[in-house]
Image (cartoon, rainbow, N blue to C red):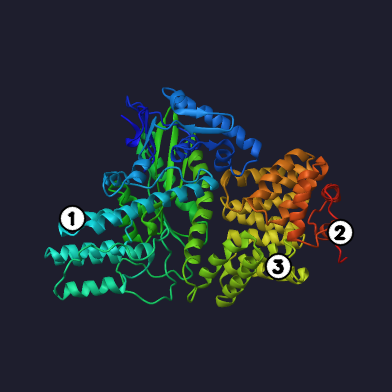
């Protein structure tokens, strides 16, 4: 056997990357690595064939949030693990040099390459496309996720284009029907394929099937794009219903519209043009919010003693999700009948109008329990948007349930919020609700690009004015104003600080049980107003209401650092990192880790953390300040000069005097440590305007 129909060397390993990843030798021995990072490394090398990949590039893709030295060390460990997994053939298929890694061309068969090489003369490889590319490797690393999204789109675009050409070539309705169905298997929202299917059925005299195809098309467009079929498709339906002459085109039409993004578009605004009512829709929620359901988990090879984990863990996760005020959670007991049956996601969405569904398995392996969970976006064709695996000892099952539930909800909360924000942002801003406006603003805040950041403030003010009793809009406006002052972008800092305090107080008055509003109010009190004891009271109440809110642990760690209690600050920072190790706001929360190391006198550690944190978001000025101070103590001018230039480009008036005037540090000795480091890094004593 030769790989993918080319080359003369025999294939030694067959790699399946579409769907669940698999790796088999020709003697049917599985050589698939067990670790997700190791699998990701193998997948990158396979999808890069026949090219080699730089070690630095691999380290950056798999450990984008670690310093370079740590990332390269981790890469060396994963190469060793990969060689162990591929032991029967590793030396024959892996080429390793000081700077590059690659798989030897010809020694590995890869299903993706077969699909990419397919043509109208050799279309059979399209049958391999029966799932998402590497569907079990989402969430490995933000850089890897971005690369994977591009690879998925490349594969999908190639398959879609080929399927369109195959459809164009068909003229006989008997051939058109399977060709159209094949294209719809790749892109369910392809209206050209739906019309070809309708015409083919009508040409065969099966008008009922043609009308049924239209109804399926309408359902798919409504569920995935919240859109109606085009006028052209509706005219075709009218012709079919009127029993007029339907003449199949000589060449069934390809998709006329440009290719859509791989992630389906979001729902239309609530005040958009009304469409035909559907019996399975629940009434609109007053201010929006994602609807989330948790299925009882599937048990694989577990004991009777552990059987209760199926419903117990689902109930714990459901209860924990219910603490997030912006979500609407469907009871896991309500979904239990689907867990015992087909676990039909489409039926679940139809019955409960759920947006996101959490599902998974519990399996015993080598004396440990392995809990594998995945989050599906049911509005996007059941696309998997998050996945995680937990390997734990089973000595204390109740503690295991609590720990896993806490980590799961802490991680999927920002994921769902990000997806919801993307949905709202990518649709036309027609009559948005306050909820829509807040979702549009959140990504613009943390990008910290000044024009877009200022736009976020306008959106939040509009939301607060539109629905004055909506707590979230006031809380996020206070959050925005806190960044406005911190970045040095406020024309009148004192006025903005006062307004931020009012917005934060308004938010917690409107909803005293909103943990996120409480912890934001706490940070406003600490960072802007230097009222630390009041801040701690608010943070602790937020944690009591929602102990799985990573933001509350991180912001309370900041307050304890300002107070000089580094022991408690570290405890809370560690808790935040355990709950949400890949938090999208880590560039903000991890800044406190730089300060903790700096105030402990570990300047090397502070500089190492600082380099990683500042690279997450180079526009965030607050992380640059402790990083600069650490570099100042270390005398690393080569790094401190460009860092200072970057800081001054964000805050032109930044100086020792300005920092001392606004610093939240309560102890003079802590403030002195930071100021001295900044001086050593070359920060001016006063700004030119002072």
Camera-side residue: 96 or 669? 96
Q: Secondary structure at mark 3?
A: helix
Q: Is residue 10 visible?
A: yes
Pointer 1 or 2: first along the chain? 1
Camera-side residue: 514 or 488? 488
The residue wearing badge 2 is 657
Q: Secondary structure at mark 1?
A: helix
Q: Tell me the mark number nearer the camera, choosing from 2 and 3.
A: 2
Image position of 449 (left or right of 20): right
State whether residue 41 is above or below residue 250: above
* Residue 175 tag number: 1
Residue drawn where x is 48% and y is 76% of the image: 431
Image position of 346 (left or right of 556): left
Q: Tell me the mark number nearer the camera, choosing from 1 and 2.
A: 1
State whether residue 635 is above or below residue 686: above
Image position of 481 (left or right of 352): right
Camera-side residue: 54 or 600? 54
Residue drawn where x is 39% and y is 40% of the image: 17
Rendered location of residue 279, percent (x, y): 29, 69
- Figure quadrant of the C terminus: bottom right
Rendered location of residue 275, percent (x, y): 34, 74
Q: Are marks 1 and 3 in contact (CB under 8 Å)?
A: no
Pointer 1 or 3: first along the chain? 1
C-alpha distance separating marks 1 and 2: 78 Å
Rendered location of residue 362, percent (x, y): 40, 38
């Amino acid at each position: 056997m030769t790989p993918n129909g080319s080359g003369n060397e025999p294939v030694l390993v067959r790699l399946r990357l579409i769907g669940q990843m698999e790796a088999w030798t020709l003697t049917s021995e599985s050589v698939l690595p067990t670790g997700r990072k190791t699998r990701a490394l193998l997948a990158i090398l396979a999808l890069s064939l026949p090219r080699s990949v730089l070690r630095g590039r691999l380290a950056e893709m798999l450990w984008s949030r670690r310093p370079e030295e740590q990332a390269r060390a981790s890469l060396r460990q994963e190469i060793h693990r990969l060689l162990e997994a591929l032991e029967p053939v590793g030396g024959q298929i892996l080429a390793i040099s000081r700077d590059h890694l690659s798989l030897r061309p010809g020694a590995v068969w890869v299903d993706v390459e077969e699909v990419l090489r397919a043509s109208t003369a050799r279309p059979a490889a399209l049958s391999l496309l029966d799932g998402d590319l590497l569907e079990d490797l989402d969430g490995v690393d933000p850089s890897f996720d971005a690369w994977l999204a591009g690879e998925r789109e490349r594969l999908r675009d190639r398959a879609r284009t080929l399927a369109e050409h195959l459809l164009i070539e068909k003229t006989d309705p008997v051939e058109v029907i399977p060709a159209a169905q094949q294209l719809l298997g790749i892109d369910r929202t392809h209206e050209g394929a739906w019309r070809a299917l309708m015409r083919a059925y009508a040409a065969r005299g099966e008008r009922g099937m043609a009308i049924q195809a239209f109804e399926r098309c309408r359902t798919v467009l409504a569920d995935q794009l919240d859109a109606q079929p085009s006028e052209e498709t509706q005219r075709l339906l009218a012709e079919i219903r009127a029993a007029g002459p339907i003449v199949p085109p000589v060449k069934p039409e390809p998709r006329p519209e440009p290719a859509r993004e791989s992630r389906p578009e979001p729902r239309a605004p609530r005040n958009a043009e009304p469409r035909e009512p559907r019996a399975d829709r629940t009434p609109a929620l007053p201010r929006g919010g994602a609807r989330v359901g948790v299925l009882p988990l599937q048990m694989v090879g577990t004991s009777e003693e552990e059987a209760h984990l199926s419903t117990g863990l689902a109930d714990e996760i459901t209860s924990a999700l219910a603490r997030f005020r912006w979500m609407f959670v469907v009871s896991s007991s309500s979904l239990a009948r689907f867990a015992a049956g087909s676990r039909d996601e489409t039926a679940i969405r139809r019955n409960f109008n759920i947006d996101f569904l959490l599902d998974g398995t519990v399996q015993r392996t080598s004396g440990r329990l392995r809990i594998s969970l995945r989050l599906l976006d049911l509005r996007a064709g059941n696309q998997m948007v998050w996945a995680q695996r937990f390997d734990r000892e089973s000595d204390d099952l109740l503690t295991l349930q609590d720990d896993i539930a806490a980590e799961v909800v802490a991680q999927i909360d920002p994921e769902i919020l990000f997806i919801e924000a993307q949905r709202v942002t990518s649709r036309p801003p027609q009559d948005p609700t306050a909820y829509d406006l807040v979702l549009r603003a959140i990504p613009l805040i943390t990008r910290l690009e000044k024009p877009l950041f200022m736009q976020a403030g306008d959106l939040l003010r509009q939301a607060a004015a539109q629905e004055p009793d909506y707590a979230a809009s006031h809380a996020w406006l206070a959050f925005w104003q806190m960044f406005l002052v911190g970045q040095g972008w406020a024309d009148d800092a004192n006025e903005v600080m006062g307004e931020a305090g009012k917005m934060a107080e308004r938010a917690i008055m409107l909803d005293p049980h909103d943990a996120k509003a409480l912890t934001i109010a706490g940070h406003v009190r600490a960072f802007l107003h230097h009222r630390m004891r009041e801040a701690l009271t608010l943070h602790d109440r937020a944690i009591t209401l929602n102990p799985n809110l990573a933001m509350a642990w991180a912001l309370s760690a900041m307050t304890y650092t300002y107070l000089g209690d580094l022991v408690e600050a570290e405890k809370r920072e560690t808790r935040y990192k355990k709950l949400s190790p890949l938090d999208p706001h880590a560039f903000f929360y991890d800044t406190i880790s730089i300060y903790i190391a700096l105030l402990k006198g570990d300047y090397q550690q502070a500089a190492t953390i600082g380099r990683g944190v500042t690279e997450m978001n180079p526009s965030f000025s607050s992380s640059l300040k402790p990083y600069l101070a650490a570099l100042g103590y270390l005398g690393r001018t080569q790094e401190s000069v460009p860092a200072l230039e970057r800081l001054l480009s964000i805050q032109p008036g930044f100086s020792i005097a300005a920092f001392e005037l606004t610093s939240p540090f309560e102890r003079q000795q802590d403030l002195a440590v930071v100021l001295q480091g900044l001086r050593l890094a070359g920060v001016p004593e006063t700004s030119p305007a002072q």
